[in-house]
Image (spheres, rainbow, N blue to C red):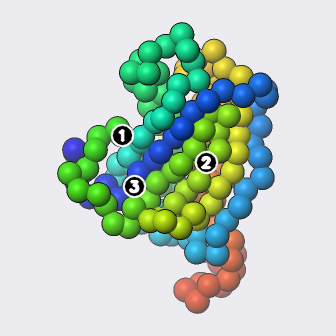
Amino acid sequence: MPRARSLLTLIAALCISGCQGAIGGADYAPQYDFSEFFAATDGRTFRVIVSGNPFPALSTAEFDRRLLPVMQANRPPRPRLTFTYDVPAEKPRPDYRLVGRFYVFAVYCRNELALSQTTASTLASGPEDQRVGQLLGQLFLVLFPDFPLFWNSRRPFLMH
């Protein structure tokens, strides 16, 4: 693996929905902290694990191969993370990951704690369909907001 210090895991369980394309509501745990997410991912790899395939005309391997560049092209503007399927030699601690489905129900986790979650869905003919990229771009912005959501002892609410 090019970056052995990868601390993150992205688990995406994907299935298709009948909606045009929408982001649902979002929930955030009081422990959510963008600065922690940024520090753990900026300039590093973010491991992706895909379960399922919403496009039955594609093999799972072909879907996986074609999905990763779409995710990378639509990643959040910050941090500068790189999505990868590479498996680390040892399970990282803390174990950050994104758990989800296409209709997507995505949960950003640190170890066993769910830090944020949202839903999204779209019709798409394949991984490169522009609706998939647009949906992922919106989903990442909702799942990883870069502003404080709660008061904490490290910094006051809405202060960067």
Left or right, 145 with respect to 91, comes to right
Q: Are marks 3 and 1 in contact (CB under 8 Å)?
A: no
- Closer to viewer: mark 2 or mark 3: 2
Residue 25 image offset from top left, x and y in percent: 78, 52
Amino acid type, mark 2: Ala
On the image, the x and y values in percent for residue 49 come to 42, 40
Closer to viewer: mark 1 or mark 2? 2
In which quadrant of the rendered view does residue 133 lie?
top right
Location of mark 2 (residue): 106
Q: Is residue 26 left or right of residue 35?
A: right
Q: Earlier in the sequence, mark 2 or mark 3?
A: 3
x and y, in percent, of residue 141 in the image: 64, 50
- 1 relative to 125, above or below: below
Q: What's the amino acid at mark 1? A: Thr
142 to 124, vertically: above or below? below
Three-letter amino acid code at the position of disc 3:
Leu
Residue that mark 1 sits on: 84
Does any portion of residue 83 appear in the rendered image? Answer: no
- In this rendered view, identify the residue nearer to me: 115 or 71: 115
Q: Earlier in the sequence, mark 3 or mark 1?
A: 3
Measure how far apart labels 2 and 3 are at the Cα level.
Answer: 15 Å
- Which of 20 and 101 lies nearest the eye of the viewer? 101
The residue under label 3 is 8
Q: In the rendered view, does 44 fall on the left or right side of 58?
A: left
Q: Position of residue 20 (x, y in %)?
A: 79, 26
